[in-house]
Image: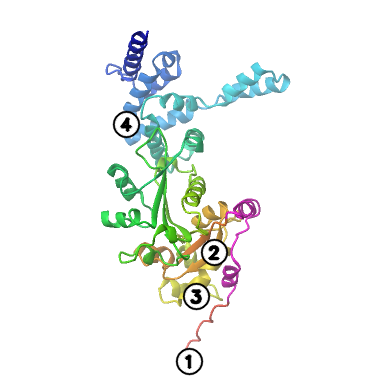
Amino acid sequence: MQRNRFLGDILSTLFDRSETIPRTDDTRDIFDLCRALLSNEGNVSGLSLAETALKRYRTLSDDDKIAFFLFLNDELDIDAPALSVLAAAYAEDPSPLAFEALSATAEPKRQELLRRLNQPLGATADLVAMRVDLLRILKEHPELARTNHDFTHLLRSWFNRGFLVLKAINWDTPARILDKIVAYEAVHQINDLDDLRRRLYPPDRRCFAFFHPAMPDEPLIFVEVALTKAVPGSVTKLLSEGRTPLEAEDAKTAVFYSISNCQKGLTGISFGNLLIKQVVAELSMSFPQLERFVTLSPIPGLNRWLATQTQDQEYGHIASAILEHSADPQDLRIMAARYLLAAKRSDGMPLDPVARFHLNNGAEVYDIHADADLSVNGRTQSSGAMVNYMYDLSRTQAHHEDFALRSIVAATKPTHTLSTTALPNKPKEPAP
């Protein structure tokens, strides 16, 4: 009995594998392969067709890729007239059959195509890479936003929290993944293996990343964490080669000093909120003595905003001095506080993208530091200023609701006071 079951398993595996091998004699173009995948042929030979279509896509030129996305956008769009008829019928008779017909017609055929393309092993990574091409082409072909919407819709379901796996990244993590951490670091560049070791090996350093089972060697997003006694005010000191490591058990503060999204094809699918919450839970369990969870974050839009303020009669001279790197550090802190708390988009949200991310997660602006990031990038985007966002777990939900519903920027009292501090008047021009 066991031998028969074992033989059956082997035969089943062989048939499954043979079905996924793309047909080398299939000369149809990618459009006909996709049409076949959506037909009855796709029900019988779906894995092989999907693998062949994905392989064919990898060989397309840029012009051919544009034609492919236009095919998805136009030929596989919703049948609006049929949908209108079915919607009217459902309004008259909301029966299960009418609902099923309406639902099937309301979904663009390209969504079903993407699901069928996602059948072979490794196909999810192919579709994520395909969306990278789509986002690039979208700039010249804005009508493809309909297709991009469907990619986003499906990727959000495939990459929802139930499928994500949190893993600690350390010095023993396989080199193929460590190489990607180095490549994907988007906030504070990792210069070499010694620099990477300083961020992963000491007892007061941690790194966590989300992975997806369909892309096990590709981090989706990762966060670098420093365990410290006090709230830090300089990433230069935090990452210093000569610092003395702290025993993790002596730490009182967990500092999220770098959060990097890794997959351009997953733009618009947010993992950061989930990552921070789960890492806070993990650290709280491992180190119950931790009292504070804060970030040490860049202020990427500060200098762009200051460049628009140089003609202001009240503080234009301060904005100019900051951009020329000749301002007093306290003036830089004041202007950064005004930017974070008061500079808004037309929809009432803060101008700064990092601020929007953390405030929407329920954090508050805790403190602002001058001369905190002396790297070329830090001086270029914010004249070296950085900000701490505090995650007070007892207040994050209230802060999130205030921000999401009323655009209220949560900030500590000292930060509010800093934002309203008077700036020095412009020196008078000497008499001729």
**Tag 2–tag 4 contact (CB < 8 Å):** no
Tag 3: residue type? Asp
| Mark before the other along the chain sequence, 2 or 1 | 2
- Residue 316: image location, x then y, percent: 51, 74
Q: Residue at x 72, y 18 (%)?
A: 93
Instruction: From the image, state whether disc 2 or disc 4 is nearer to you.
Output: 2
| Mark before the other along the chain sequence, 1 or 4 | 4
- In the image, the segment drawn in magenta is 393-421
Instruction: From the image, state whether disc 2 or disc 1 is nearer to you.
Output: 2
| Mark before the other along the chain sequence, 4 or 3 | 4
* Residue 255 found in image quarter: bottom left
Instruction: From the image, state whether disc 3 or disc 2 is nearer to you.
Output: 2
Magenta residue check for 395: yes
Q: CA distance from mark 3 to mark 2?
A: 18 Å
Q: Residue at x 26, y 54 (%)?
A: 193
Res 311 visible: no
Tag 4: residue type? Arg
Quickly name the residue at label 1. 431
Tag 1: residue type? Ala
Badge 2 marks a residue whose secondary structure is strand
Crowd around label 3: few <14 · some 14–19 · many ≥20 (10 Å): many
Quickly name the residue at label 4. 58
Quickly name the residue at label 2. 366
Crowd around label 1: few <14 · some 14–19 · many ≥20 (10 Å): few
| Mark before the other along the chain sequence, 3 or 1 | 3
Quickly name the residue at label 3. 331
**Image position of 351 with respect to 418: above or below:** above
**Tag 2–tag 1 contact (CB < 8 Å):** no
Instruction: From the image, state whether disc 1 or disc 4 is nearer to you.
Output: 4
Locate the N terminus and report the quarter of the image it occupies.
Answer: top left
